[in-house]
Amino acid sequence: MVDLRTEFLGIKSPNPFWLASAPPTDRETNVVRALKAGWGGVVWKTLGEDPHIINVNGARYGAIHGPDRRLLGFNNIELITDRPLDINLQEIKKVKRDWPDRAIVVSLMVPCEESNWKNILARVEETEADGIELNFGCPHGMSERGMGSAVGQVPEYIEMVARWCKAHTRMPVIVKLTPNITDIRYPARAARKGGADAVSLINTISSIMGVDLDRMAPSPHVDGKGTHGGYCGPAVKPIALCMVAEIARDRETSGLPISAIGGITTWRDAAEFIAMGAGTVQVCTAAMTYGFKIIDEMISGLKTWMLAKGYETIEDFRGRAVGNVTDWQYLNLNYVVKARIDQDLCIKCGRCHIVCEDTSHQAIATVVNGKRQFVVKDEECVGCNLCVEVCPVEDCITLVPLTEGVDPRTGEPIRSGYANWTTHPNNPMRVAAAE
């Protein structure tokens, strides 16, 4: 049996899928809908004490779409909650009372003075929420006011505020990190040094989605003017995964609990972040794209995969990929792979040949042997994987190891390097030359 129950900093939830602090967690109505749908928890949209938070009444979101209109990247210029603090706190208390088995974490952002943090922490504690998340990541609007990423980009500030919060609350403290920084390890180290119980990452990436060439203004725009916003969605997943890995394998932050955020759209995305050390995963853009019921696919998919792999809990595979992340200098330069094209799957489009000829190593040749074929020239192939990535047919082109061992095509012993396949009697180029 597969058990997805999760305990993160003592916070229990029926599964590791939490909704991130964002528009979907702005109010009781949305949060309750999410919990009914099956989400393991939520991080309530960022609260502050400033009564003058006013969001724009216009385009707050921008997007980049693929050819099929699938959303690849998402951008927003929305600020923290513009709802009264008292109302939010009342709703948080009610939701936690009604849903005691779900994780309810509260995101916070106030000016960088100890008294501000002390005051809001006392009020949040009264809701009996499970923990707090310090929003040091928001790259727009609030950063211009000395909050958000303006704090997250300065490790000394992170350490200072984390220490304040640990001194003034019994709740677990999670520090949400900004990706708008050169090396994510430094803010993570500062969070640990300040006593934070965990980190969450990544927050959104500072971005402008495009330019309206008719208005000559950034897109989206409000009354003809635009600004940079926060980039998220599937496109940022590789960046988030890299930053999570850097923290997980850093000696100074090793063992620091991580709640992963960034482009998590499927169960596989979640499994990858967990394998890289995350204890929970937070989702936003996927919910805003497909609705809260996407949780059904995430849960069923993760359970099915875990069952197939023999994992009973997420702890059985959490962090197992971290040890295989290394620096470039430690990669095995004696490891040899070559591309192989499955002629039965090949649709003869020639994309592999074109890109290899124009932009790579001229390692794919066109062979006319009764019919048009594309074959790999091992003496030129460096195993770069470009042909695999541009091929429109899945698994048509693969990389095959050619180090000491057995040729996977024939079962025959091979020495090393590429010479064996080049001279192999079944190589289409050799057959064509012979004829």
Image (tube, rainbow, N blue to C red):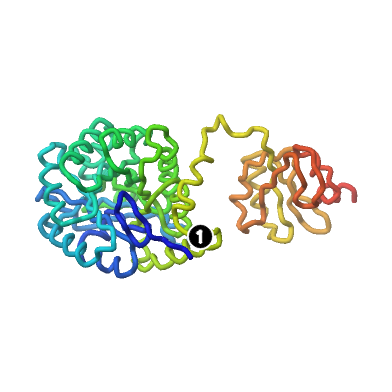
Occupied quadrant, residue 419: top right
Q: Circle 1 sits in a helix, a strand or a loop, which is it?
A: helix
**Observer-nearest residue: 72 or 332?**
332
Please state if 164 lies on the left or on the right of 272 as rendered: left
Q: Position of residue 182 (x, y in %)?
A: 37, 33
Q: Amino acid at mark 1?
A: Met
Outermost residue to the right: 435
> Which residue carries the number 1 mark?
306
**Observer-nearest residue: 156 or 318?**
318
Residue at image location 48% in from the left, 53% down from the top = 316
Residue at image location 29% in from the left, 37% down from the top = 191
Please state if 272 lies on the left or on the right of 20 as rendered: right
Please state if 432 lies on the left or on the right of 341 as rendered: right
Q: Position of residue 75 (x, y in %)?
A: 33, 52
Q: Position of residue 281 (x, y in %)?
A: 37, 53
Residue at image location 51% in from the left, 40% down from the top = 323
Occupied quadrant, residue 173: top left
Numbered disc total: 1
Q: Position of residue 31 (x, y in %)?
A: 25, 64
- Category of crowding for the residue at label 1, using alpha-carbon neighbours closer than 10 angstroms: few (below 14), some (14–19), many (at least 20): many
Q: Is residue 58 above or below residue 353?
A: below
**Observer-nearest residue: 185 or 366?**
185
Q: Is residue 158 above or below residue 140?
A: above
Please state if 385 lies on the left or on the right of 173 as rendered: right
